[in-house]
Image (cartoon, helix red, strand yellow):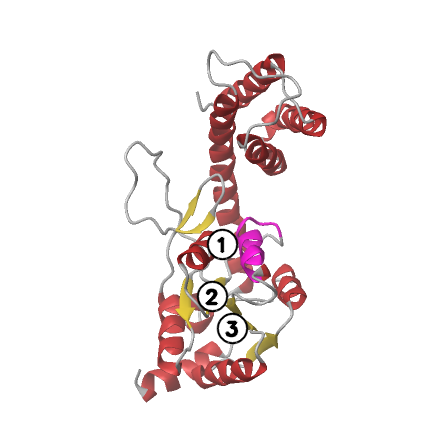
Amino acid sequence: MGQQKIHINRKNFSNAKVLLAEFDPERRKCYEGFLAQIGFKNILSTNKLKDVEQAIAGGNVDLLVCDTSMEEGGVINLIRAMRLGMLNNDLFPLVISMIGEPTQDLVQKVINSGSDNILVKPIVFESFCERIHQLATRREAFVVTSDYIGPDRRQKRRAGAMEVPKTQVPNPLHNKVTGFYSEAAYDACVSRTVNILNKLRIERQCYQIGYLVERIHPEGTQVVDHGKLPMEWRRLVFTARDLAKRVKGSPYAHVNGMASTLVSFVKEMDEAGSLTTTDVKLLSHLSQGISRGLSLN
């Protein structure tokens, strides 16, 4: 990384807001120095998860650089919540996740959270700077599934799998370092893109509900009353609630009534801890009704 390139970007990066979340005080000081050397001036540095959540919820983050081990991995769940729109309306801060021991399980969790990039410790300045410049230049398009919103990580589509469209999303760092940043224009772009992703998510959740209902009650199989709920049930509870929350104010608002009925019914069955054949038939009718309302079948 040449000195001239770093010098040029010192001025541009000064407009961006970066949140550094690192538990170890010595490493945190080191990474603060890295960020300052690149040209960042607006740096919020913390070792507390609540500070990260508040900063994201307040719209004060363009780039999040975080230690995935902080507070027993709670930051990973926070990234996922951000991508799902559970913290505020902006799903698009860039995220670099730092990993100490890159086990397969941990790497998969970080990928599934919606992080843009991963750095393995110990981290040197050249790698740190390179990743940030890469993200400022270009970020991956997002995909939406029933349990994920974030950068497209697929190497290739599985045979028989549903085609998942890619959506280009705002890049807050790119907008600011290029010097053409307009807060109003960026906010409008965020709102438009969130609406697109929300519509895709609704459609995916509708398909997922139909799939889960079929798995809960395969054709020709009786569901035993007061039996143990099948493992797909927990997924159905989450999916139904997520769907009902998202249809409000969307182009699919006309299915709000059916979606709310589905949530109420699922809640009732969940509290009872049991399912009958009649219950599952009603679930199937509600699922099919929502699909028809969305013109998905």
Overall secondary structure of the magenta section: helix
Cα distance between the residues tagged 3 and 2? 18 Å
Q: Secondary structure at mark 1?
A: helix
Q: Amino acid under label 2?
A: Ser
Which residue is drawn at the image coordinates 62% and 54% (left, top)? 88
Which residue is drawn at the image coordinates 51% and 34% (left, top)? 205
Residue 160 falls left or right of residue 30: left
Q: Residues within 10 Å of mark 2 (few under 14, many from 20)?
A: many
Read off the residue under disc 1. 113
Read off the residue under disc 2. 97
Residue 273 falls left or right of residue 184: right
Which residue is drawn at the image coordinates 59% and 76% (left, top)? 45
Read off the residue under disc 3. 16
Cα distance between the residues tagged 3 and 1? 23 Å
Along the viewing direction, whichever of 72 and 57 lies nearer the viewer: 72
**Tag 2 near tag 1, CB within 8 Å:** yes
Q: Which residues are magenta?
A: 75-86
Could you tell which of marks 2 and 1 lies nearer the N-terminus?
A: 2
